[in-house]
Amino acid sequence: MTSVIQMRAADIPRLAEVHAQAWKETYAGMLSEEFLAAVTPESRLQMWQRATPEGMKRHWVAEDDGIIVGFAGVQPAKPGTEAAREELWGLYLLQSHQGLGLGGALLRVALEQRPASLWVAEENSQAIGFYQHQGFTFDGGREVVEDWENLVELRMIR
């Protein structure tokens, strides 16, 4: 049975594992194998351990039979996105759980129908199609993430 719930402190170790694996699955072919090899559960664990109780209220996990298989996180929108007060900073699901409705469920719980922005890799046609289906459109925002081997991201809003 699948469900989407608010993140809990006890979720952090598994969340770090899922984050690293989903990142590798998502960006395979877009980033080098060497770059992706450095994305480890340990590196993600350090990031998630900095989550404050207030920050955890802005993150949700997708579970399948009690095992975390994905997550979504929302933060205040960055300046320059006047159409949205919130930004979906991440929505990741393990490949094994994509196409089952969990991505839409995560998005609905995280944002409901509120306006929001997000950044998506220009080469990630699967994610772009998903977000378009969820009502997001490109607004012309484009950035090159130098720390991610110059990955090009496009901004979408709804």
Image (cartoon, grey):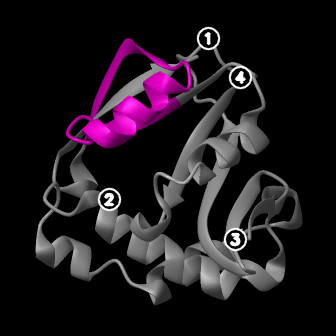
Mark closer to the chain start, 2 or 4: 2
* Lateral position of residue 142 relative to residue 62, left or right: left
| Marks 3 & 4, CB-CB < 8 Å contact | no
Give the x, y percent position of residue 70.
58, 65
Give the x, y percent position of residue 29.
13, 59
Looking at numbered disc 2 in the image, what kind of residue is underneath it? Thr
Q: Circle 4 is placed at which residue position?
A: 85
Bounds of the magenta segment = 118-144
Location of residue 37 by image quarter: bottom left
Disc 2 on helix, strand or loop?
Answer: helix
Q: Is residue 39 magenta?
A: no
Residue at coordinates 65% horizontally, 18% vertically from top-left?
A: 84
Q: Is residue 33 above or below residue 100?
A: below
Q: Circle 3 is placed at which residue position?
A: 63
Disc 3 on helix, strand or loop?
Answer: strand
Q: CA distance from mark 3 to mark 4?
A: 28 Å
Location of residue 55 by image quarter: bottom right
Crowdedness near tag 2: few (<14), some (14–19) or many (≥20) residues, C-alpha within 10 Å: some
Location of residue 62 by image quarter: bottom right
Mark closer to the chain start, 3 or 1: 3
Q: Circle 1 is placed at which residue position?
A: 82
Crowdedness near tag 3: few (<14), some (14–19) or many (≥20) residues, C-alpha within 10 Å: some
Mark closer to the chain start, 2 or 3: 2
- Which quadrant would the N terminus be assigned to in this image? bottom right
Looking at numbered disc 4 in the image, what kind of residue is underneath it? Arg
Q: Circle 2 is placed at which residue position?
A: 26
